[in-house]
Image (cartoon, rainbow, N blue to C red):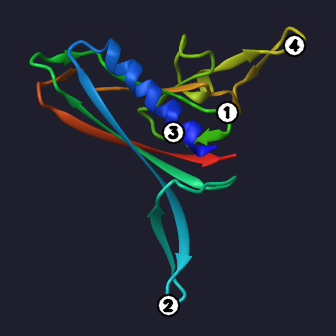
Amino acid sequence: MFRMMGLAFAGAAMAAQASAQPPIRFDTQMFVERVTTDINGRPRRILTSTDRTGPGDQVIVVVQWRNEGRQWARGQSIVRPVPRDVQIDFSDPAMQLSIDGGQHWGRMDQLWLPTPLGGIRRAVAADITHIRWTLPEEAAPGQTGRLSYRATIR
């Protein structure tokens, strides 16, 4: 299940990289956050590989980017599809959300969907199809950055 999610995240990175001029390279790492108890009975958070995941697991996704071109990159963004079996923690104020495959973007309180009876309803976390962050207005050649977000396996 999680391997398919990883492929979806990686596919989005390649699509973003292919359309980016100058070339922006994306590297994605994923970890499962586990809570264990140490010898003194205190909880400890550790990051483990994503080899085995299941419903309820907290996943941390780290995306590192680098402008590998010789020119300044302007107006670039990182777009990620959200697999159906994953719920994103969208508390990051810089994160933009889409419920229609990336055609329209906004914060959760700005997103509405039509209902079968002709009304509208607020979007919920399960409706999110894509997430996006805009890189700095201008990224110098060689400039790097990192962002991370949390998700829960449903």
Amino acid type assigned to the residue bearing label 4 in the image: Pro
Of the two numbered discs 1 and 2 on the same chain, state the one appearing first in sequence: 2
Q: Residue 138 placed where, x, y %? A: 19, 20
- Residue, disc 2: 39
Question: Closer to the N terminus: mark 3 or mark 2?
Answer: 3
Which residue sits at x=20%, y=18%? Answer: 73
For marks 4 and 1, the one nearer the N-term is 1
Q: Residues within 10 Å of mark 3 (few under 14, many from 20)?
A: some
Seen at 50% across and 90% down, the residue is 39
Please give the residue where the numbered disc 1 appears in the rendered image. 84
Residue 125 sits above or below residue 96 on the image: below
**Helix, strand or loop status at disc 2:** loop
> Whole-percent x and y of residue 129?
61, 25
User: 76 or 57, which lies in front?
Assistant: 57
Q: Which mark is residue 139?
A: none
Which quadrant of the view contains residue 74? top left
From the viewer's perspective, tell me whether residue 58 is left or right of residue 20. Answer: right
The mark that comes first in sequence, 4 or 2, is: 2
